[in-house]
Amino acid sequence: MRQDKLTSTFQMALADAQSLAAGRDHATIEPAHLLMALLDQSAGTVRPLLDKAGVNLNQLRPQLTALLERLPTVEGGAADLHLSNGLTRLLNVTDKLAQKRGDQFISSELFVLALLDDKGDVSAMLKATGASKEAMEKAIADVRGGQTVNDA
């Protein structure tokens, strides 16, 4: 997946996820890092969309923090920090979702949709805190108003 196809806010979130992983001495950037970065974006769309979709953000955030604390660390810091296989797969699914919608750029809310179809820990956390694919689809449709993402 080409990073220049990501919206600017999604690119920033990915960079923030990398910083989060590096700061915690993790060897790879995981889906949990990216979701946490998306939740922390002040001008991002993910937090308001999750709230609109009925997700309990007060439960989700501490659960994500606990998951990040359980991830293995590397001594001396990660020299070669890279995307985990799971995150790479989810980003590819996100790319396909954008293509199906006719989007020219990949937006962060589609990453959340990809997460909801995943079988991993972050997906389970989202669902346990009230997320559903149907509610997220409706929230995205309401915000987008039928528009596609044609601008970074």
Image (cartoon, rainbow, N blue to C red):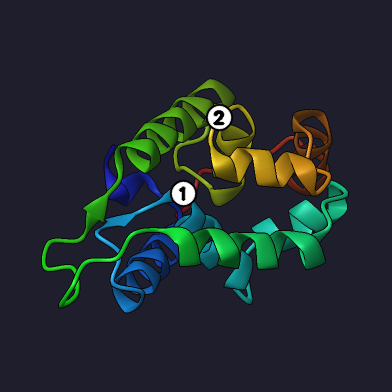
**Disc on res. 31:** 1
The reply to whether residue 9 is visible in this rendering is: no
What residue is shown with label 2?
Answer: 118
Label 1 vs 2, first from the N-terminus: 1
- In this view, 141 is above or below 26: above
Residue placed farthest to the left in the image? 79
Instruction: Say left or right for 114 vs 83.
Output: right
**Disc on res. 133:** none
Badge 1: how crowded within 10 Å, few (<14), some, or many (20+)?
Answer: many
Quadrant housing the C terminus: bottom left
- Alpha carbon distance from label 1 to label 2: 11 Å
Instruction: Say left or right for 113 vs 130.
Output: left
Report x, y in % for residue 117.
Answer: 61, 27
**Residue at point 82%, 51% (across, down):** 55
Quadrant housing the N terminus: top left
Report x, y in % for residue 131.
Answer: 78, 42
